[in-house]
């Protein structure tokens, strides 16, 4: 039926003729006066496979609608592109998550076989995020290797790097406090943060190791490290946050695109420092207790 309707109104190709350098197509279709009104479509006569004739309006259900201006396909499947502008743009991520969680599943349930994908800016952002995560993973490996060599240990670099996840938590808290959503620049700040927050823990561990080489017990060494390095660690954190504060609290339009990166770095350093002063000594002593227990069990055997 679709083929007969198309041939009647658009035309059926019956001949191709070469005319000079051009190829001319010859189409056969209904006369113009028989294809200019809706009545002509309803009264169109179709031929059935058995050779009988039937009116189109008796063979199909006809309803009014609006057709697409063009039909696009990808990998043999018809696609429809939907675009939208979000105001304010900072809420685009939340709206996208709501659409993906509520609206799209209903559409897929209503129309089996429906598939969707995010293109344009969302696709570029997804690709950038994947690239950033790969870069962050490589940075973690390099940081671990650079810490393991001078410390001559495989465990102590992990104790130092325990501050990195808490720095990321601090970056998220900073975005919530300041009312910003995560963006690509926020992730840039997180990647930079991963190399900064290890400094405080490194200072504590290095000082404790030197005290142990001088003959101190592990507990006394880490306590001395906390006492002697507390002021430098706090001052370093405060000066870092203070240097970023003008950018964080800037209200001009020119600086707004850099604020998420400053938030990740500034709040991440502050939060990671507070956690570092508590967790790093605790993990340091926990590792020493495990070593002592293993040595004791080995001696008893």
Image: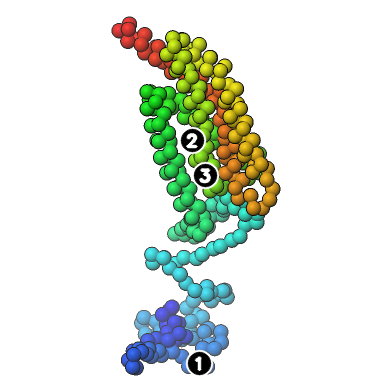
Per the rendering, the mark at residue 210 is: none
**Which residue is painted at 66% across and 53% down in the image?**
253
Label 3 and label 2: CA atoms lie apart by 12 Å
Answer with the quarter of the image where residue 22 lies: bottom left
Quarter of the N terminus within the rendering: bottom left
Label 1 and label 2: CA atoms lie apart by 75 Å
Q: Nearer the viewer, residue 173 or 243?
A: 243
Q: Are marks 3 and 1 in contact (CB under 8 Å)?
A: no
The residue at the far left in this view is 301
SS for tag 1? helix
x%, y% of residue 31?
Answer: 48, 93
Between disc 3 and disc 2, whose residue precedes?
3
Label 3 and label 1: CA atoms lie apart by 64 Å
Residue at image mark 1? 32
Q: Are marks 1 and 2 in contact (CB under 8 Å)?
A: no
Which of discs 3 and 1 lies nearer the camera? The answer is 3
Residue at image mark 2? 195
């Amino acid at each position: 039926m679709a083929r007969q309707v198309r041939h009647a109104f658009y035309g059926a190709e019956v001949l191709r003729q070469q005319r000079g350098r051009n190829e001319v197509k010859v189409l056969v279709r209904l006369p113009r006066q028989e294809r200019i009104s809706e009545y002509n479509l309803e009264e169109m006569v179709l031929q059935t496979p058995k050779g009988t004739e039937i009116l189109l309006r008796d063979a199909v259900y006809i309803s009014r609608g609006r057709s697409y201006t063009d039909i696009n396909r990808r990998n043999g499947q018809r696609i429809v592109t939907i675009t939208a502008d979000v105001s304010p743009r900072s809420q685009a991520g939340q709206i996208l998550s709501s659409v993906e969680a509520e609206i799209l599943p209903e559409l897929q349930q209503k129309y089996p076989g429906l598939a969707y994908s995010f293109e344009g800016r969302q696709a570029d952002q997804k690709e950038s995020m994947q690239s950033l995560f790969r870069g962050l993973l490589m940075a973690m490996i390099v940081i671990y290797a650079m810490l393991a060599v001078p410390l001559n240990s495989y465990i102590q670099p992990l104790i130092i790097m325990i501050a990195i996840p808490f720095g990321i938590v601090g970056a998220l808290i900073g975005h919530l406090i300041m009312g910003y959503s995560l963006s690509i620049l926020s992730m840039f700040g997180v990647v930079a943060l991963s190399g900064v927050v290890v400094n405080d823990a490194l200072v504590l561990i290095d000082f404790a190791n030197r005290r142990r080489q001088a003959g101190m017990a592990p507990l006394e060494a880490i306590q001395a490290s906390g006492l002697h390095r507390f002021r430098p660690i706090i001052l370093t954190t405060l000066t870092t946050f203070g240097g970023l504060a003008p950018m964080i609290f800037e209200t001009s339009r020119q600086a707004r695109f850099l604020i998420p990166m400053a938030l990740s770095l500034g709040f991440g350093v502050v939060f990671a420092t507070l956690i570092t002063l508590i967790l790093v000594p605790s993990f340091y002593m926990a590792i020493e207790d495990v070593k002592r227990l293993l040595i004791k069990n080995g001696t008893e055997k």
